[in-house]
Image (cartoon, rainbow, N blue to C red):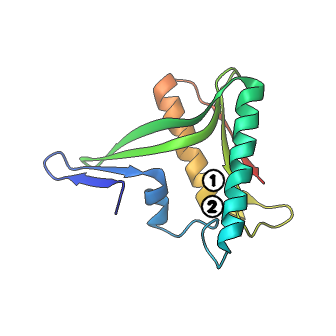
């Protein structure tokens, strides 16, 4: 698969956060029989929200992050892109924007979308590892 590399000599695996989560289950936002047009509309809504927030607050979007974890002699290198990182705030705020097609009116991310929560947790942990400051995290459902 794209985004995964295992290096035998160093016993390390490099993987994108999406690929890591996909090992457990297909993200809810891509599951089901969504029409292509619906997917395009959701992508546009995501892009609009992201660009409006970034412009209004003068912060960055699509911020690349990396997290390296070592366990039992093996190294896992996780990479991803944060939708919005508002580092003007104290603590910094990591925002992950989701446009899943099948959302309940009042979604419970922990129960209904654990992959979204896991993705946000990895992003927050990566920022903490990089900066030494534990950020806040926010899931935004459109």
Q: Quadrant of residue 99?
A: bottom right
Pointer 1 and pointer 2: residues touching (CB < 8 Å)?
A: yes
Q: Position of residue 117 (x, y in %)?
A: 63, 53
Mark 2 = which residue? 114
The one of 129 and 26 positioned closer to us in this rendering: 26
**SS class of the residue under badge 2?**
helix
Labels in figure, total: 2
The one of 94 and 46 positioned closer to us in this rendering: 46
Distance from disc 1 to disc 2, alpha carbons, whole Å, reads 5 Å
Q: Is residue 110 visible?
A: no
**SS class of the residue under badge 1?**
helix
Q: Quadrant of residue 79?
A: top left
Q: Please indicate whether residue 25 sits to the left or right of residue 40 in the image.
A: left
Q: Quadrant of residue 77?
A: top left
User: Which label was assigned to residue 117?
Assistant: 1
Q: Residue at x 23, y 47 (%)?
A: 73
User: Which label was assigned to residue 32?
Assistant: none
In this view, 100 is above or below 3 = below
The one of 38 and 96 positioned closer to us in this rendering: 38
Q: Residue furthest front?
A: 37
In this view, 136 is above or below 16 = above
Q: Position of residue 33 (x, y in %)?
A: 65, 79
């Amino acid at each position: 698969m794209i985004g995964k590399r295992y290096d035998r000599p160093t016993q390390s695996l490099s993987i994108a956060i999406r690929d890591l989560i996909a090992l457990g289950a297909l993200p809810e936002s891509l599951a089901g029989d969504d029409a292509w047009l619906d997917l395009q509309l959701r992508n546009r809504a995501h892009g609009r929200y992201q660009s409006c927030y970034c412009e209004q607050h003068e912060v960055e979007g699509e911020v690349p992050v990396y997290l390296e974890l070592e366990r039992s002699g093996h190294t896992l290198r996780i990479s991803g892109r944060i939708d919005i990182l508002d580092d003007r705030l104290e603590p910094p705020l990591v925002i992950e924007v989701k446009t899943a097609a099948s959302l309940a009116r009042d979604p419970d991310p922990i129960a209904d979308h654990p992959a979204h929560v896991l993705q946000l947790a990895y992003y927050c942990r990566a920022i903490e590892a990089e900066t030494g400051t534990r950020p806040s995290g926010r899931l935004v459902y459109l």
